[in-house]
Amino acid sequence: MTLIRLEKISRRYQMGTELVHALREVSVEIQRGEYVAIMGPSGSGKSTLMNLVGCLDSPTSGRYELNGTDVSQMDDNQLAEVRNREIGFVFQTFNLLPRSNALHNVELPLIYGGMGGVERRRTALEALAQVGLADRVHHRPNELSGGQRQRVAVARALVNNPSILLADEPTGNLDSKTGTEIMALFEDLSRKGNTIIVVTHEEEIARHARRILRIRDGLIASDELIGAAAAS
Amino acid sequence: MNFFTELREGLSISFAAIRANKMRAALTTLGIVIGIVTVTLMGTAIEGLNRSFMQSVSTLGADVLYVSRQNWITRSHAEWLLMMKRRPISIDQYRALEKQSPFALAVAPTTEDGMSVKFKNRRSDSVDVIGTTEAYLLTSGVGLMEGRFLTAAEAEGGRPVCVIGSQVATNLFIREPALGSRITVGPRTFEVVGVLETQGSMLGMNSLDNRVIIPLRQFTTWIWNNPDLDIAVKVKNVVELEDAREELRHVMRRIRHVAPGEPDDFSINQQDQFVEMFHRVAGTIGAIGLFITGLSLFVGGIGIMNIMFVSVAERTREIGIRKAIGAKRRTILLQFLIEAASICLLGGLIGLAVAWPVTLVIQKFLPATMSFTIVGIALLVSLVTGVLSGFFPAWRAARMNPVDALRAE
Ligand SMILES: Nc1ncnc2c1ncn2[C@@H]1O[C@H](COP(=O)(O)OP(=O)(O)OP(=O)(O)O)[C@@H](O)[C@H]1O
Ligand SMILES: [Mg+2]
């Protein structure tokens, strides 16, 4: 079943007199349950694509269907709702609220989703347990290691069962050992049926995925299935 | 989305933010504090002034009309000169008026002069010596501390008796009893038959207790032969005060032979005129206070707006994170509005805490109290200032593009 359908999506930035083409008429489809890696040189448009898929940004032209609904014409508040219900984001720099503890960080999407206190707390604790942080729920981000912080971010991304998990270089700020741990976590989530899209520079990381999209200059240069997915 | 969950979250975020920058928040509130102190003190002062004024005015009596040659309050020097040219009100006119006033409960003529009064080797200076009749007891509403007031026979006759104010009594009599003693007023001695209750002063001006009341006949015999009288008319029914006033005017015109079409050559005063003057004074105080309050709240509001812009800029990334996980515009807007309002409320509370002891000091001069109304108004004003000055920064935060916000350092 098609979860994401991009049709001739372009994103241009006006920089003074110069027009920067971050994405040029990109068309791609991603099915529910897929695990996709996006690769490409710096400045090729990976983050731009992720932000569009994650509804953080709107395309300059083109059509984006998420779960069968056209989101390219939605207004700010509708997009906020889509982000809250359908999208889970994991960033390179973790992006946790520094003054809040792990539990509250994970509760936040549920607060914006309007879930009541008791159920919210239970759901957040479950999500933290799922990423192996049941014993760190009252720690603030600065009291956690990098890997633990990224786990909190993953728990926050997953806590309200989004349709897609988006991760823009999730291991970029981690050493290779913790990076591998996070990737193992992703693999686990993928096996449980989550749809995952990961941006990465590292071939080794990308090989965890079933499909690799390579981007160059705002265009899709290649789109290949790998490993078990390619074989089937 | 659940509004109360959102509100709770907004409150906890802004408290955390304020706690993280205590010093900054406290300094920012300075303008608000000054504004709230002014608004509170002004309100307290006006309320106190009001009360002391009403106390003074009530001694004049709401149901008494005062016929005089002049208005109590003149608006210009020219008007005053014009009134000074009017004929004095004579004793004959008073007698005629008394006969023709069915609407009056009591009609008391008064005339007065400032002079010294003596007892043995003690003297009391600039005492109001008032010549009047027994009706004065009714029109003035004064009570007696000791003895009795003048009788009708004494007012008409030649017996030299007097009633003295409490201040005169304390000035002249130390060990001797006042009643039965003879004091010297002008060229004669008068026997003290009564001492008036203490009345205080009229808005801090002339004391009502520094006076001596003698029979009108005695006054005209020994002090002025042809005095200019003021006539106090206590009406029977205060509800019909306006009708009585009209009737009184007609009677006076007839008595003073004012030709039809001519303007009155006398004035009828009532305490409203004082009330009106007072309202002008209170209005001026209020306007000045309001100006200072408005100015400091404006400056304070600008300060809050400035610090909110700083707060929004500092937390751009946080805004980006919140938006990325589903915060709507109004969620962000609410969060920063709550923060601005909380800072201002804090300022309001500090302002009240400063104003409270100052009120206690004012209380020594005026019957002032900080009422719940004033406290409520002060808090409301600071809340509104917070919301108004926080709105622009909060709106800017709410409209941020999530991608740009996340990219911020
Ligand atoms: N807000 C912006 N304003 C102007 N140009 C932008 C903006 N965001 C991205 N770009 C431009 O769009 C192009 C794609 O940027 P993008 O961030 O998608 O690259 P990327 O593939 O994620 O690179 P990296 O691997 O370094 O993260 C770049 O040339 C960049 O300069
Ligand atoms: Mg990038």
Image: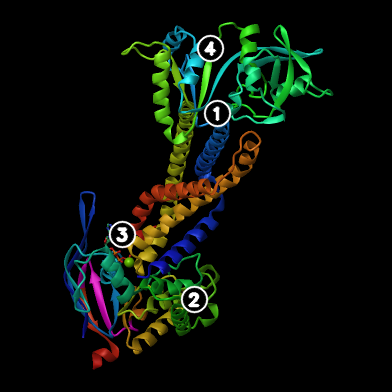
Q: Can residue A93 be seen in this view?
A: no
Q: What element carries label 1?
A: loop
Label 1 neighbour load within 10 Å: few <14, some 14-19, many 20+: some
Tell me whether marks 4 and 1 sit on the same chain. yes
Please say which color scheme the image uses: rainbow
Residue A72 at x, y = what percent? 20, 68
Q: What residue type is labelled 1?
A: Leu
Q: Give the residues drawn in magenta, as a range.
A: A207-220
Discs 1, 3 touching: Cβ within 8 Å: no
Report how far apart the C-alphas of labels 3 and 2 lie in the structure.
Answer: 28 Å
Residue with the mark numbered 2? A148
Q: Where is residue A74 drawn, in percent x and y?
A: 22, 66
Q: Which of marks 1 and 3 is nearer the N terminus?
A: 1
Neighbor class of circle 3 (other Cα within 10 Å; few <14, some 14-19, many 20+) is some
Q: Which of B184 and A110 is in front in this view?
A: B184
In which quadrant of the rendered view does residue A212 lie?
bottom left
Nearest the viewer among A49 and A161 is A161
Mark 3 vs mark 2: in front: 3
Specify the quadrant that holds the C terminus of chain B: bottom left
Q: Do labels 2 and 4 share a chain?
A: no
- Disc 2 crowd rating (10 Å Cα; few below 14, some 14-19, many 20+) is many
Q: Does the stretch in magenta take in B27? A: no
Beta carbon of the mark 3 residue lies under 8 A of ligand 1: no
Q: Say if mark 2 contacts mark 4, CB within 8 Å.
A: no
Residue drawn 76% across and 13% down? B118
Residue at numbered disc 3: B401
Look at label 3 and name its amino acid: Asn
Task: Check if residue A219 falls in the magenta segment.
Answer: yes
Q: Mark 1 points at which residue?
A: B60
Indicate the chain on which mark 2 is placed. Answer: A
Write down the chain letter for disc 3.
Answer: B
| Callout 4 amino acid | Ile
